[in-house]
Image (cartoon, helix red, strand yellow):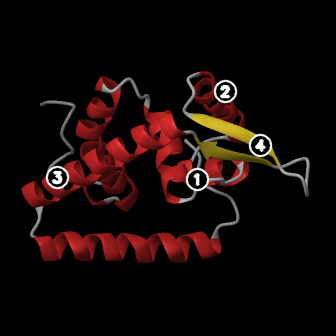
């Protein structure tokens, strides 16, 4: 039996364990796009930062760490690399010197625009291969509901 596939429904605990199902689905859904990002010379951690800034340029390191689901110390190293590559720039807050805001450069914005378009295309293809359009919308709505409820009850961010 291949280790790449989840167990069949009659194989016990994992086959019906929500966290396992979510993790497996996430890995399968992300894999093809992560390959595209790698081909573009973009590590997954950098893609996450670009996506966060594409949505809300100028976020603080703390907020990006929360959204990108990364330990802040790891994110700082990622941001250092991205700064050296000319994808982002950092500015310390004038109001609170402890806060550092991160902005996309023109180069970073162009790469983010390209990769967000690719991510949207990959998502559409992945959903179309597995679900109807209505099922895809419903799945996203259910996941959003779960995330909002769980986030309201959890004081800390998920970190990977």
- Coordinates of residue 126 in the picture (x, y in percent): 16, 52
Q: Nearer the viewer, residue 150 or 57?
A: 57
Say few, some or many: other residues with alpha carbon within 10 Å of mark 4 (under 14 / 14 to 19 / 20 or more). Answer: few
Q: Which mark is residue 80?
A: 2
* Residue highlighted by disc 1: 158
Q: Is residue 65 visible?
A: yes
Q: Closer to the camera: disc 4 or disc 2?
A: 4
Q: Name the residue under label 4.
A: 91
For the residues labelled 4 and 2, the Cα–Cα distance comes to 13 Å
Q: In this view, does 139 lie to the left or right of 10?
A: right
Residue drawn at 13 percent across, 71 percent down: 133
Viewer-side label of 3, 1: 3
126 to the left or right of 89: left
Local SS, label 3: helix
Front position among marks 2 and 3 = 2
- Marks 3 and 4, the one that precedes in the sequence: 4
The quadrant of the picture occupied by the C terminus is top right
Q: Which numbered disc, 2 or 3, marks the residue that appears first in the sequence?
A: 2
Residue drawn 15% across the image and 30% down it: 2
Residue 31 is tagged as none
Q: Tell me the CA gap for discs 2 and 3.
A: 33 Å
Tell me where residue 76 sits by quadrant: top right
Q: Which of marks 3 and 1 is nearer the N terminus?
A: 3
Residue 147 in the image: x percent, y percent? 48, 69
Q: Mark 3 points at which residue?
A: 126
Q: Which of marks 4 and 1 is nearer the N terminus?
A: 4
Q: Residue at x 44, y 28 (%)?
A: 43
């Amino acid at each position: 039996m291949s280790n790449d596939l989840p167990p069949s429904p009659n194989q016990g605990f994992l086959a019906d364990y929500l966290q396992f199902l979510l993790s497996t689905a996430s890995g399968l859904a992300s894999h093809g796009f992560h390959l595209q990002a790698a081909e573009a010379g973009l590590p997954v951690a950098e893609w996450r930062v670009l996506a966060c800034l594409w949505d809300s340029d100028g976020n603080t390191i703390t907020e990006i760490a929360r959204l990108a689901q990364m330990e802040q110390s790891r994110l700082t190293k990622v941001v250092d690399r991205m700064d050296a590559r000319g994808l982002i720039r950092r500015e310390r807050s004038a109001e609170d010197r402890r806060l550092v805001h991160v902005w996309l450069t023109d180069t970073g914005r162009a790469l983010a625009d390209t990769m967000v378009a690719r991510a949207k295309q990959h998502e559409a293809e992945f959903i179309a291969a597995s679900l109807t359009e209505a099922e895809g919308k419903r799945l996203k709505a259910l996941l959003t509901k779960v995330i909002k409820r769980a986030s309201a009850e959890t004081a800390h961010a998920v970190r990977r």
